[in-house]
Amino acid sequence: MEPIAVVDEGLGNSSYLLDLGDGRAAVLDPARDPRPYTGRAGRRGLTVAFAVETHVHADFVTGTRELAADGAQIVAAAGAELAYPHRGVHDGDRVDLGGLVLEAIATPGHTPAHVAWLLRDGETPLGVFTGGALVVGGMARTDLAGRERTGELARAAYRSIRDRLLALPDELPVWPTHGPGSFCSTDATGERTSTIGLEKAGNPLLVGDPDEDTFVARLTAGFGSYPAYFDRLPTENQAGPRVFGRPWPALSLPDLDVDAVQGLLARGAQVVDARPIDRFARGHLPGSISDELRGQFGTWLGWVADPSRPVVLVVDDDQDVDELLRQALTVGVEDIAGRLGGGIEAWRAAGYEVHTLPLIDVDAVDRQDVLDIRQDTEWQAGHLPHAAHVELGALAGGADVPVSGSTAVMCAHGQRSMTAASLIARGRGDSRGLEVVAGSAEDWAQATGRDLEDGA
């Protein structure tokens, strides 16, 4: 029995809808918006009866409580210490789904109380939901429960994989939660599902049957930075996120006139501009953060926005506000005051200052300083000679900007660069001297015929 994968490409995660064969369904690791699960279930004549967690999530707000509001039973590890009604299970416990059974396998590592779920039909194993304990080509990182526990949990992960998961049949399907594009994962391939045998043979963490020290060294070497909101969501998921109920999301996005926006800014609100970067480049509110609405909007919103301050949005009428709210709520950004009514033109018409931030082509990168704000792994794979480097997430965290003159900011496409440039401009108080490169290092090399440098 193959579960239905519900993939969030922006977060790089998969949830699973499992048809129980009796008009009911179970959902594994649901994200906050219940509609992808209830919608798919409804089209198949199913009711979601179980909402099952492998672990306390750091990268998204759990959707179990939304599904529970519709009658589902929440099932999670007892050690997760959830502060809301649920069925807590221990290692070896079995949850009868009405013919099918989920058996809890304690697999600490990614989180201290992580469990994998072995799906059985009677005594016949059908597959295993591994959460972050084993992903395709890697496993999920062990430093999210506190950096001081990284090594301890990495060693626990070694034992979880070697003694528990690899003891399962080679042909058994592996259904992970984390996958390509997830900041929770390490060394993941482009695939989202696998088998135990394929992971034994091809997972870089497991090649050569490593001892514990070798495994830990391989695993922790793959850790890069992760979004700032990862540090707060586990606590919020344990305590129990707010339930919105139906219709979802019950969160309005009122139009705010210019005076209302000015009042909010005076009281500490922040402006997030979700328009495409070419529109932001032509004109935006001073001090606003560019975060173009796309699959990764929510991840970067959670990383660069201050969770203690209300958000005022700038969006255009042709943008999908429902998708914007879905992503914001998925990463726990709920204090959204509204949108600037009339957009940037209303702001300009009221006589207020509008800033610009030029977009330039790669072949225009010449004499100015270059600031590359990609992740370390991207930078090391190839960058412009003599470019300075600091990750976008570090800029959001207050890192010093290593350039001060006329600066071209670049990433892989331009969206992250515009976010970075907007943060730098906000810190400086103006955007003069900043330009954003609409292209990648590879585009620059192709356009100029020059070689990139690699390595740290």
Image: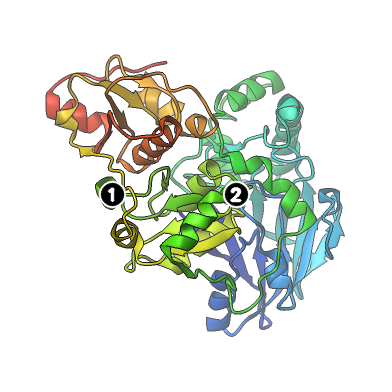
Q: Residue at x 79, y 55 (%)?
A: 239
Q: Earlier in the sequence, mark 2 or mark 1?
A: 1
Structural distance between the alpha carbons of marks 2 and 1: 23 Å
Query: Where residue 258 sits in the image (x, y, percent)?
Result: 42, 61
Query: Where residue 245 sits in the image (x, y, percent)?
Result: 66, 75
The residue that disc 1 covers is 283
Q: Which mark is residue 404?
A: none
Name above or below for residue 151 compared with residue 272: above
The picture quadrant where one finds residue 35 is bottom right
- Quarter containing the N terminus: bottom right
Name above or below for residue 265 compared with residue 380: below
For the residue marked with disc 1, what is the amino acid? Gly
The residue that disc 2 covers is 309
- Relative placement, left or right, of 391 versus 448 is right
- Relative placement, left or right, of 68 versus 346 is right
Name above or below for residue 139 compared with residue 8: above
Query: Where residue 163 sits in the image (x, y, percent)?
Result: 75, 37
Other-residue count near label 1 (Cα within 10 Å), few / some / many at <14 / 14–19 / ≥20: some
Q: State whether residue 68 appears in this view.
A: yes
Count of numbered marks: 2
The picture quadrant where one finds residue 101 is bottom right
Q: Secondary structure at mark 2?
A: loop
Other-residue count near label 2 (Cα within 10 Å), few / some / many at <14 / 14–19 / ≥20: some
- Quarter containing the C terminus: top left
Q: Residue at x 62, y 63 (%)?
A: 32
